[in-house]
Image: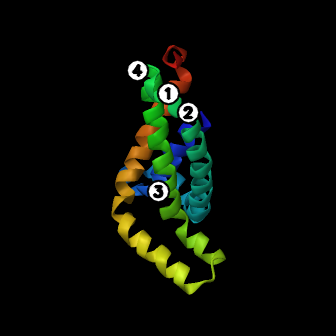
């Protein structure tokens, strides 16, 4: 359940314009927006850890339809965690990286991937909802 909620919050931080018509949602996003860099770093670290899990569960690919769907959702979650984690956390990461060349490379990478931030934000919200449904519907577990 935690993963689903995290993905929804991460998506809302990445694509706050999706909630432009909801003043209540905008207030909630505004309260956590100062911490967006830390959310990004946490997501990046969590994405790396989940990537290791993903490599461990590759056997699910040939185990039937439900395990395959779970694997694909899990893989999408890892991609979104890594992508949005980098995009949202880069400002905070740069505080700890003093090498100008490394910072310049980070800026170049960010320039290449930032056009996808809104899309990844929407995907993150959708994945969050899917993960919440998965947690609350036991018959989906196989």
Query: What residue occupies the far bottom of the structure in this picture?
Result: 100
Image spot of residue 96 (x, y percent): 66, 75
Q: Residues within 10 Å of mark 1 (few under 14, many from 20)?
A: some
The residue pinned by badge 4 equals 65
- Give the foreground label among 2 and 3: 2
| Disc 2 from disc 3: Cα separation | 21 Å
Q: Where does label 3 land, which residue?
A: 83
How many residues crowd mark 2 within 10 Å: few (<14), some (14–19), many (20+)? few
Image quadrant where one finds the N terminus: top right
Q: Alpha-carbon neighbours of circle 4 within 10 Å: few (<14), some, or many (≥20)?
A: few
Which residue does the numbered mark 2 point to in the structure image? Answer: 57
Q: Is residue 142 above or below residue 134?
A: above
Can residue 51 be seen from the camera position used here? yes
Nearer-N-terminus badge (1/3) = 1
Q: Which secondary structure, mark 4?
A: helix
Query: Could you say which is closer to the camera, residue 125 or residue 120?
Result: 120
- Residue 60 picture location, percent across and down: 50, 27
Task: Answer above or below: position of 46 versus 130.
Answer: below
Q: Element type at marker 1?
A: helix
Q: Nearer the viewer, mark 1 or mark 3?
A: 1
Residue at 60% x, 60% y is: 41
Mark 1–mark 4 Cα distance, whole angstroms, equals: 9 Å
Residue 44 in the image, given as x and y percentages of width and height: 57, 56
Label 2 close to label 1 by CB (< 8 Å): yes
Give residue 135's quadrant in the image: top right
Q: Residue at x 46, y 49 (%)?
A: 79
- The CA span between labels 1 and 3 is 24 Å
Q: 8 or 89, which is in the foreground? A: 89
């Amino acid at each position: 359940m935690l993963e689903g909620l995290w993905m929804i919050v991460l998506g809302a931080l990445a694509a706050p314009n999706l909630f432009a018509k909801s003043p209540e949602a905008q207030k909630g996003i505004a309260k956590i927006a100062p911490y967006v860099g830390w959310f990004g770093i946490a997501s990046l670290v969590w994405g790396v850890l989940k990537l290791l899990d993903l490599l461990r569960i590759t056997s699910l690919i040939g185990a039937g339809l439900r395990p395959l769907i779970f694997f694909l959702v899990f893989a999408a979650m890892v991609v979104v965690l890594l992508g949005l984690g980098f995009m949202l956390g880069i400002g905070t990461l740069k505080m700890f990286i003093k090498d100008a060349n490394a910072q310049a490379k980070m800026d170049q990478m960010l320039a290449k991937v930032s056009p996808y931030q809104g899309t990844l934000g929407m995907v993150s919200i959708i994945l969050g909802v899917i993960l919440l449904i998965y947690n609350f519907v036991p018959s989906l577990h196989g």
